[in-house]
Image (cartoon, rainbow, N blue to C red):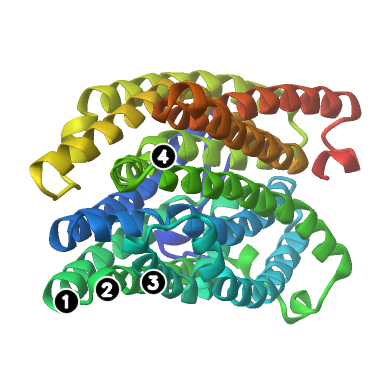
Amino acid sequence: MFTERRREGTASVARTQDMTAGSPVRLILIFALPILAGNLLQQLYSLIDSLIIGQLLGVTALTAVSASGWLDWAVLSIPMGLAQGYSIHAAQCYGGKQLDELKRTVGQGYLISAAATVLLEAASQVLLHPVLTWMNSPAETLRLTEQYLRIIYAGLPVVMYLNVFSGFLHALGNSRTPLLALACSSAVNIGLDWWFVGSLGMGTNGGAYATVLAQTVSAVICLRAVVRIPELRPARADYRPDVRMIRKLTRLGFPIAFQNLIISAGGLVLQGIVNAFGFIFMAGYNAAARLQGLVEIAGSSLGNAVGTYTGQNIGAENMDRVRLGLRKSAWIGLGLALAVGGIVAGFGRPILSLFIRAEADVAEQVLAVGVDFLRIMAAGLPMLYLLFVYRSTLQGMGDTVIPMVSGFVELALRIGTALLLPLLLREWGVYLAEISAWIGAGCFLMAGCYRRLRLLSRKGAGHPDAAG
């Protein structure tokens, strides 16, 4: 049955949710909806940020900020990957009622994150300019992009612990607090965008400062919820370095972080190829790419819910529920992809036009490029949504290696397609690079997921290999 618990009479923000009993569809959807709403808010304030910059500062400033997307993701996705690894083990501990192990996971996760933040901050600031130069960034945008990203990277400690706090809450079935945190940070971000960019005239840097401050608000809200849940409050002993636990968490988290980095590397190469086609193509492609996060959120939110559901049921040694949840989620994902794809294909042009301010002939050329890319993107959404479901199921089962290898598949297909197809199809070859990566990685993940299910069914979910 559906179970929801409040710990020690705390406020509703500290709710947890047991996903080891009850209707899988109901549990997954109830858990996914707040994640979807939160991701929608996050994308909304990202789009409003783009809208403000595009309308107030012009197409060059918008292109500079949009061109930062893959480099932004390359660095910030590493905290996301590490936090996701911690949350996998935390969900398995919670499902198996191993509460001492859960507290140890939290304490050691905090330690690993502190060390990773120091290394990542240093590397990102040192390598930023050489990487932007290597990517063929146009002279019109290079300086603006570099300034914007240096401010974003300065907020890495906030991003790291925001993801860690949010990940632990998700592991215990609490998707409402991250939603509240994103709602508050979205409001802060939008307000500060108008003030910094519009009133104070801080340019693109103002948008970056607004983002970092808004993320700080979100992290504080998630931290307040985490400390109210007894299972997430480590004892002093849980902070002492534990080689066994550090090895376990890094074995789960680093492959996900590395997978994100691999995908980012492919995106950076692709961005370099896009830049080589000239400013008009770069502006249109990047404007559409700013909408890609919005297009993906239904699938990624479903995947996050499936990962938590799978992790808790693996901890409870219930393989039948894992298989049932996967099957139902795949059908839900396909339905969502068709609905979102239809909206994108039908309304992409008027939405894109909101972000582009330039002379009429330039705006029309930029818009034509963006609309073509959006339509290709819409056609590939069914496979992308299945990719999210199968990748998250694997990660929930404790297998982060196959998803990491799928990142190499994405890398090879994205780069190979982007380098070869433009020789035959010009710009259309670049458009097809993204969905070719989705198709290849999706097929690889499906095969790996069913193989993992057979392996765990033979050994039993409680076998030591089940979580490794």
The N terminus lies in quadrant: top right
Q: Earlier in the sequence, mark 4 or mark 2?
A: 2
- Dots 4, 3 in contact, CB < 8 A: no
First along the sequence among labels 4 and 3: 3
Residue 95 spot, x, y in % from top left:
69, 45
Q: Which residue is located at x 55 percent, y 46 percent?
A: 269
Judged from the image, the secondary structure of the residue bearing numbered disc 1 is loop
Identify the residue under disc 1.
Answer: 201
> Does dot 3 land on a helix, a strand or a loop?
helix
Q: Position of residue 189 (x, y in %)?
A: 28, 66
The three-letter amino acid code for the residue at tag 3 is Val
Q: Is residue 392 above or below residue 91?
A: above
Q: Secondary structure at mark 4?
A: helix
In primary-sequence order, the first of circles 1 and 3 is: 1
- Residue projecting furthest to the front: 423
For mark 2, what is the residue?
206
Mark nearer the viewer, 3 or 2: 2
Q: Nearer the viewer, residue 136 or 344?
A: 136
Q: Nearer the viewer, residue 446 or 435?
A: 435
**CB under 8 Å between discs 2 and 1:** yes
- Give the residue number, with chain letter if any, for mark 4: 297
Q: Which residue is mark 3?
A: 212
Q: Are marks 3 and 2 in contact (CB under 8 Å)?
A: no
Q: What residue is at 43 percent from the left and 45 percent from the top?
A: 276
Amino acid type, label 4 = Ile
